[in-house]
Image (tube, rainbow, N blue to C red):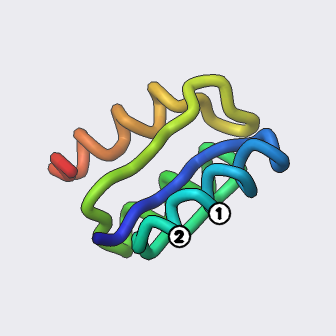
Amino acid sequence: MRLLLVEDDLPLAEALMSLLVSSGYAVDCVHDGEAARDLVAVEDFDLMILDLNLPELDGLSVLRAMRAQGNRA
């Protein structure tokens, strides 16, 4: 299962990534909303863990952009 973690708090992101990877998941991580929006536009993920309070573009805006592109993941 391929996951996208979108978290701007670096220590939290590292801890979550470590736990998820040790549980057998393939994890990509980005740290701002624009990077998340751009990545989901070109890559497929089974699950996204999305922080709502992000720099550049907030999490709800990322989700709205995904839905506007027809992405229901």
The answer to whether 25 appears left or right of 18 in the picture is left
In the rendered image, which quarter is residue 53 located in? top right
Which residue lies at the image location 62% right of the left edge and 50% below the top edge?
16
Which residue lies at the image location 39% right of the left edge and 50% below the top edge?
48
The answer to whether 65 appears left or right of 70 in the picture is right
Q: Name the residue under label 1.
A: 18
- Label 1 residue SS: helix
Q: Mark 2 points at which residue?
A: 21
Which residue lies at the image location 31% right of the left edge and 54% below the top edge?
47
Q: Point out residue 66 in the picture as x, y percentages from the top left corner.
A: 31, 46
Q: Point out residue 40 in the picture as x, y percentages from the top left corner.
A: 40, 61
- The answer to whether the residues at label 1 and label 2 have Cβ atoms under 8 Å apart is yes
Q: Point out residue 72 in the picture as x, y percentages from the top left corner.
A: 16, 47
Picture mark count:
2
The amino acid sitting under disc 1 is Ser
Spatial CA span between label 1 and label 2: 5 Å
The amino acid sitting under disc 2 is Val
The answer to whether 31 appears left or right of 35 in the picture is right
